[in-house]
Image (cartoon, rainbow, N blue to C red):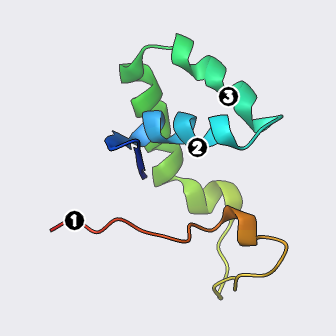
C-alpha cells in the first residue's frame, strides 16, 4: 500500500495507519500502532499481506462501486513517471 498525503509518501504499515486515522471510530483506534516500533509493524503488515487470501477468502469477481462503498474509493490517483 502507498499513501501520498501533503506531498509525502507513506508505505506499508505507515500507509495503513494514515488511512485508518481518517476512517473514524473504531478504525482510528489502530493508531495505537504508532507505539510499536516500525520494524515490527512493517513485519506484521507484510505477514498479513502475504496471507490475505487465507485470512479473508477470495472471490471470483470484482466488486463494482456502489453508493454504499463509493466513499471508500479514491477519485484521483497519482502516477509515477
Position of 78 with respect to 5 (left or right) is left
Q: Spatial distance from mark 2 to mark 1, Cα to Cα? A: 20 Å
- In the rendering, which numbered label is found on residue 80? 1
For disc 3, the neighbor class at 10 Å (few under 14, some 14 to 19, many from 20) is some
Q: Label 2, secondary structure: give it.
A: helix
x, y percent for residue 4: 39, 48
State the residue in front, 7 or 51: 7
Please tell me whether residue 65 is drawn above or below residue 10 in the rendered image: below
**Identity of the residue drawn at 64% across and 34% down:** 21
Q: Label 3, secondary structure: give it.
A: helix
Q: Spatial distance from mark 2 to mark 3, Cα to Cα? A: 10 Å
Please tell me whether residue 18 is drawn above or below residue 30 in the rendered image: below
Q: Quadrant of residue 72?
A: bottom right
x, y percent for residue 67: 82, 78
Please tell me whether residue 52 is drawn above or below residue 76 in the rendered image: above
Position of 39 with respect to 65 (left or right) is left
Q: Quadrant of residue 31?
A: top right
Q: Label 1, secondary structure: give it.
A: loop
Amino acid at each position: 500500500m502507498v499513501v501520498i498525503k501533503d506531498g509525502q509518501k507513506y508505505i506499508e504499515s505507515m500507509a495503513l495507519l494514515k488511512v485508518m486515522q481518517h476512517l473514524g471510530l473504531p478504525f482510528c483506534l489502530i493508531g495505537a500502532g504508532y507505539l510499536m516500533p516500525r520494524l515490527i509493524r512493517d513485519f506484521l503488515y507484510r505477514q498479513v499481506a502475504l496471507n490475505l487470501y487465507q485470512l479473508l477468502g477470495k472471490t471470483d469477481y470484482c466488486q463494482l462501486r456502489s453508493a454504499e462503498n463509493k466513499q471508500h474509493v479514491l477519485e484521483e490517483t497519482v502516477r509515477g513517471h
